[in-house]
Image: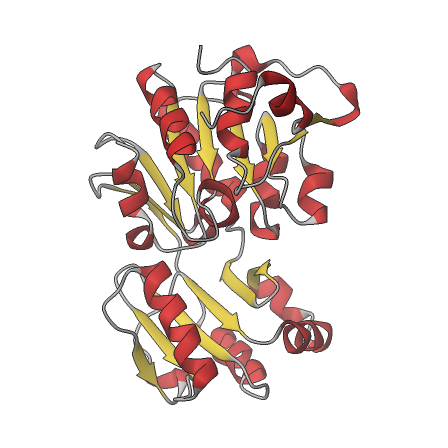
Amino acid sequence: MSGMDNAEASSRVLQKERIYLDYSKIRYFVFDIDGTLVTEEKKISPATKQAVMRLLDKGYRVSIASGRRIGGFRRYARELGFADDATLIGMNGGQIETMSGAPIYKAPLEDKGDLADYVDFWLDYPVILVYYFADHLVSLNLQDDEVGKDFLHTLLERAEVASVESARDPREIEGLPLKVLTYGDPDIIQEAIQKMPDRFADCFSQVLSEPFFFEIMKKGTSKGNGVEKAADALGLSMDRIMTFGDQNNDLSMIRQAGIGVAMGNACPDLKEAADVVIGTNEEDGIAHFLEEAGFLD
């Protein structure tokens, strides 16, 4: 740990409404990545790494649940020492497999016509769209300018692919993706959301995962439902699970878990939904909380 004394660590944990939380029932921990498990430099801090590895040593089940494709975060699971049978949840719950690559669940989008209409709507705006498949990405409207280059760098870093295919027309893209991500200026994203036809909400699960990322998945897909599927495979009920997150795409798993934990840097809606609010991802919030709550004893 970082040398913060117990009094300082305690001051960073807010238990909502002084309700009683039974930590003793928790057997399974699920962590979001960006803004939660990693710092702004996209690294797991030594204290957080030590704490999560201690959970594994004590026999707890630990998973990662991310909006990223699983190939984009397997290295973090490897760094933490996940066993081959550990469960990884990607694509906001639309892709679940074991650390060794054994498939558990996959939920691609279902209707090419609805997807084409959705993409046509966004192409009226200066945004970039990315089709996420399990093993590759395809972009639409990716321009060779500074914005496009910066986004491509971020995309390659997070998705851990060597390159991103490009298409001019969505009808050229073969197969149905696990999700489609829209990237753009937050004000433009918000303007488009306000004008988006209501029927798209009936066709897809939708989430604003960050102010500049809007994503769609197969209807019914969410991190919460993904965690529930993973728990079912392990024979665990949701009340035995503790989830950690920071953004709107974490809301479902925060609400559905036995105990939902919001990072100190979380968006307001997530803090409101969580049972506990802890320190930020830059303050080793996870490590201090797990130590204080007695999980590392």
- In the image, taking residue 53 as reference, residue 248 lies left or right, namely right
Rendered view: 194 above or below 223: below
Q: Nearer the viewer, residue 72 or 280?
A: 280
- The front one of 2 and 178 is 2
Q: Quadrant of residue 149?
A: bottom left
Does residue 103 appear anywhere in the picture?
yes
**Which image quarter holds the C terminus?**
top left
Q: Quadrant of residue 102?
A: top left
In which quadrant is the N terminus drawn?
Answer: top left
Q: In the rendered view, does 193 fall on the left or right side of 62?
A: right
Percent x, y of residue 184: 56, 76
Q: Quadrant of residue 140?
A: bottom left
Residue 141 visible in this rendered orientation of the protein = no
Residue ID at (57%, 30%):
257
* Residue located at (44% from left, 84% from top): 146
Q: Position of residue 88 (x, y in %)?
A: 34, 40
Residue 135 image offset from top left, x and y in percent: 25, 61
Q: How many marks?
A: 0
Q: How is the image coloured?
A: secondary structure
| Image side of residue 22 versus residue 57, left or right | right
81 up-or-down from 177: above or below: above
The x, y position of residue 230, in whole percent, is 40, 34
* Left or right placement of residue 101 versus residue 76 in this view: left
Residues 73 and 50: in front is 50
Q: Is residue 110 above or below residue 138?
A: above
Depicted 126 relative to depicted 113: above or below = below
User: Which residue is painted at 38% across and 47% down in the image?
Assistant: 43
User: Which residue is drawn at the image coordinates 57% and 65% (left, top)?
Assistant: 203
